[in-house]
Amino acid sequence: MKERKIIKISDTILVNNKPEKVFDFFANPSNDNLWRTEINQSILNGDLELGVKISEYSYLSKKIPNNLIELNCIDFDKNKLAIFETQSNSEFYIKSQRKVSAISDNKTEVIYTLDFDINLVKYALGFALPKFIVSLKANSDLKKYLKQLKTKLEIF
């Protein structure tokens, strides 16, 4: 198996909504296409709980417009934490951690952490980019995603 170079990004945002509502939306990958622009569709193969499998179809590039990545829920604590990770035999490693903490009855802290194999970018583009460029772009995208998530969560 080839060496994996992992990029880890994380950001936090405060949402004006109840922690339970925020968690129900944010922790469920089937909602990802509503706030993550590259997601075409995420399918939960069962209830959102420890061990559920997720089929995530994403637009990586014109060359790869509907890439499938399969994830498993490896940690789940209702209204607090959901972690999804690719299986050990996956071509590219991805780990998505979604954490929710109550600040007050109607204010919730959301922490989204993503670890991914930089080789996924090379696969999508057909050529490698320096790690710092990929990291800058990924951090920028993450900030946009969380702003979109906040907008979605504060209107319902």
Image: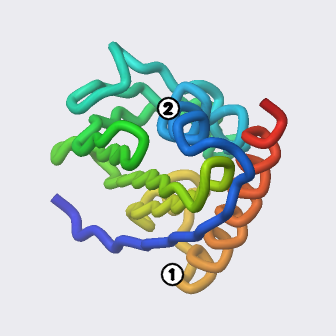
Q: Is residue 82 left or right of residue 24?
A: left
Q: Residues within 10 Å of mark 1 (few under 14, many from 20)?
A: some
Query: Mark 1: which secondary structure?
Result: helix
Q: Are marks 2 and 1 in contact (CB under 8 Å)?
A: no
The number of callouts visible is: 2
Residue behind mark 2: 28
**Looking at the rendering, which quadrant does residue 69 occupy?**
top left
Q: Nearer the viewer, residue 121 or 58?
A: 58
Query: Mark 2: which secondary structure?
Result: loop
Q: Which mark is residue 49?
A: none
Q: Residue sitting at 53 percent across and 37 percent down?
A: 20
The quadrant of the rendering that contains the N terminus is bottom left
The quadrant of the rendering that contains the C terminus is top right
Q: Amino acid at mark 2?
A: Asn
In the rendered image, residue 24, in percent from the top left (x then y), is placed at 52, 32
Q: Amino acid at mark 1?
A: Lys
Q: For the view shown, which residue lies furthest in the top direction?
A: 46
Q: Nearer the viewer, residue 107 or 61?
A: 107
In the rendered image, residue 92, in percent from the top left (x then y), is placed at 34, 52
Q: Residue sitting at 43 percent across and 72 percent down?
A: 8
Q: Looking at the image, is mark 2 or mark 1 earlier in the sequence?
A: 2
Tell me if residue 128 comes above or below residue 65 in the rendering. below
Residue behind mark 1: 131
Q: Residues within 10 Å of mark 2 (few under 14, many from 20)?
A: some
Q: Is residue 31 left or right of residue 140?
A: left
Q: Nearer the viewer, residue 46 or 70?
A: 46
In the rendered image, residue 29, in percent from the top left (x then y), is placed at 50, 33
Disc number lying in front (2 or 1): 2
